[in-house]
Structure formats: structure tokens, C-alpha cells
Image (spheres, helix red, strand yellow):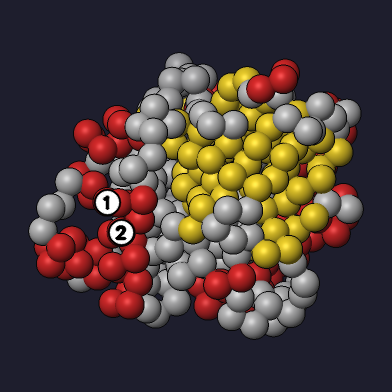
Amino acid sequence: MALQPLTAKDIAQKILANEEVFLLDIRKEEDYSDWAIQGRNVRSMNIPYNLLKNGVDDVKEQLPEDQTIYVVCAKGISSQNGVEILQDAGVQNITYLEGGMTAWSEHLEPMKIGNLSDGGELYQFLRIGKGCLSYMVVANGEAAVVDASRMIDTYIDFANQKNIDIKYVLDTHLHADHISGGKTLAEQTGGRYYFPPKDDNGLTFDFNKLEDGTKIIVGGSVEINAFYSPGHTIGSTSFIVDKKYLMTGDILFIESIGRPDLAGKADDWVDDLRRTLYESYHDLSQDLDVLPAHFGAMEEINEDGTVYAKLEELYQMNDHLKVEDEKEFRHLVTDNLPPQPNSHEEIRNTNMGKVNPNQDERREMEVGPNRCAV
């Protein structure tokens, strides 16, 4: 009897629980090398589907006999054929990832970060397959969502389960690695959409200005205080939430820092990035918990499945915050950048409302890992 397919939520929860997972990825070698499912206890091997069709004897010898094998492809179609081929060859205890890497890229896993004033709560939405992080601040029946992904139904469903209204939607900057769901989420929930005006490179829709000193009070009790923190983009804005948490957008990550080149202005923005990291953040309370908009490696995920760390700890362990020489910092940030995110210009134009791709095109634009870090 064939096993039920594994959903993206199933595999995310297995990985976050540090369960052992074995994956047989049958995509092309270059696609697998560029982007694959990872985790502390994940083992995977890559056998492209065309090779699998030509014979499975060698493959069978490499497969474990004591655990379930999950076959992975791009969209969950070829993997079903791959399962049939291997079952016909006598391989048991095998199934596939429903929806493939597309579903993996789109899954959001809500994780509670902690409690806030007056019974409030803070949640992190972990987009584990893409490395994106978004947030929901909850207090007294109201919510604010920060850096929403385009899968807005997840936030709406979560708010409905909690019996709360999404009143505010905020983007820390103009995103270039993923399509923002901010404006659409605000429209569908009646929330007020906030965006930093210095990142307005021709937005085609209205927004509330998110500027240095902007204060948003959720549920009448939990304060979100915005302050200008340029460097990743010229309009990048950070938030201090309830005097406990620092939401850094794409300026500061757990193991790296934001890249300043996605608008083609690395040389112009690198000094802003340094001032934000080495002056503005340095002058804040070092007891703040840093909540970034991305993570770059599974090692950045804590044992409880969350991604955050004390600001003080980052100044001690993040090597990008220890470069005393300004010229060396400029060299580090501008001369050693990884490849740019897939379709980053198309994504920027989509987030400005200049183009309106269909859902399949939006999915294709987001294929691959995030590459917002230096």
C-alpha cells in the first residue's frame, strides 16, 4: 500500500523537531546544488529523474532500509512517478513531498517568540524553505503584521483562529528577494499599510509613511517604535517592539548583515549600512532580542524553532560587526557579494506595483534561496 504524501507542513515540523529525515531529490543536479531542503538531521541524495528512469539498481543500494524515504521534485509531479519506479523495483516505505519544492518554498510555520505587555504576544512566521521571517504583534484583539510574505491566507487564518483583527501591516523596506504580501494583506483585512517613503521608487499605490519616530500602538498597549536604519536599502526602517525586541528587517541577521547592492547602489549605501550597524544599533539597549527578516542557514534556528538572539550576543559573535577599519568593511561588503536573488528586479517592480504577474509567475520568480546577506 502506498504511503500518504508528506506535506510541506509535515516535513517542516519534523525538521524543527530535529527528527531524522531522508530525502531523495530527483531534480536536476544544478537545481539541487543551488537550493535544497536542509536541516540538522536531514540526509539527502540527488539522483535526477532521467537517471532514475534508466535504472534503479545502484540507487537502491544507497537508500536506507530503516527509515521512510521522501522523494522530492520541483512541483510534486515527477516525484510520484519516481515513487512508482522505486516501488516496482522493490523499494518499500517510500513516499513523496506533496507540491515539491514549490510547496516547500511557500510554507509558513508560526512560532511563538514571547509575551508582550498587557497579555500581548509576539509570533514569528518561519518560511523555512525560503529563509524569510515575518511577524505578528498581538494585543487586546488587534494585530500588526511585519514583512508579510505573499501567502497572506496564513496570516488571515491565524488571526481568525486567535479571534483578532489585523489593524496594521508594515514593510521594513522595498523587498527584492521575495514578493511582499503587505499591501494585499492590508486591502483584504482593512488594515493600515505602512511603508518607508525613502524606498518609494515609483510605487503605484498609496501608503502611510513609515518614518523615523513613527509610533504604532497595537491593542492600545503594545508600542511599535520605528527608527530610520538605512543600508540594505535607502529607506530601511527598524522597529523596537514593546521595548524588548529589535526588528532589523534585512540590516542585521544572526550570522551576517544585509547587502547594500540590490538596487545597484552598493558604493552609495555601504557607509549608511556601517553607520546603522556600528552606531545606531550599537547605541541601543544591548538586551534587546534581534528579530531579522531572514536567516541564511539552518544553524541560525534555535532549538525551539525560533530565530532570534540578544543584540549583545551578536556584537560578540557576528564577525561582520567586528570590522574596525572602514576600508576593510567597505571591501567586505561590496567586493565579496554572493549572486543576487533570482528575478530580483522583477520582484522589486512587482512590489512597487509596476507589474502584475499571475500566481504561477510569482511562484517562479521566488524559486531558490534568499540571498539578502553579505
Give the camera-side residue of 31 and 14.
Answer: 14
Is 358 on the left-hand or right-hand side of 180? right
Is 3 on the left-hand or right-hand side of 366? right
What residue sits right under mark 2 in the picture? 275
Give the camera-side residue of 220 and 193.
Answer: 220
Name the residue rendered at 43%, 63% in the picture: 230
Q: Amino acid at mark 2?
A: Arg
Q: Amino acid at mark 1?
A: Tyr
Residues at discs 2 and 1 in contact (Cβ within 8 Å): yes
Image coordinates of residue 69 in percent, x first then y, are: 52, 30
Name the residue rendered at 58%, 36% in the picture: 241
Q: Find residue 355 and report its image quarter.
A: bottom right
Q: Find residue 354 and report its image quarter.
A: bottom right
Is 351 on the left-hand or right-hand side of 313? right
Disc 1 crowd rating (10 Å Cα; few below 14, some 14-19, many 20+) is some
Image coordinates of residue 202 in percent, x first then y, are: 64, 82
- Whole-number angstrom distance, CA of label 2 to CA of label 1: 5 Å
Mark 2 residue element: helix
What residue sits right under mark 1 in the picture? 278
Whether residue 122 can be seen here: yes
Image coordinates of residue 374 in percent, x first then y, are: 30, 58
Mark 1 residue element: helix
Disc 2 crowd rating (10 Å Cα; few below 14, some 14-19, many 20+) is some
Looking at the image, is 212 positioned above or below residue 319? Answer: below
Give the camera-side residue of 315 and 97.
Answer: 315
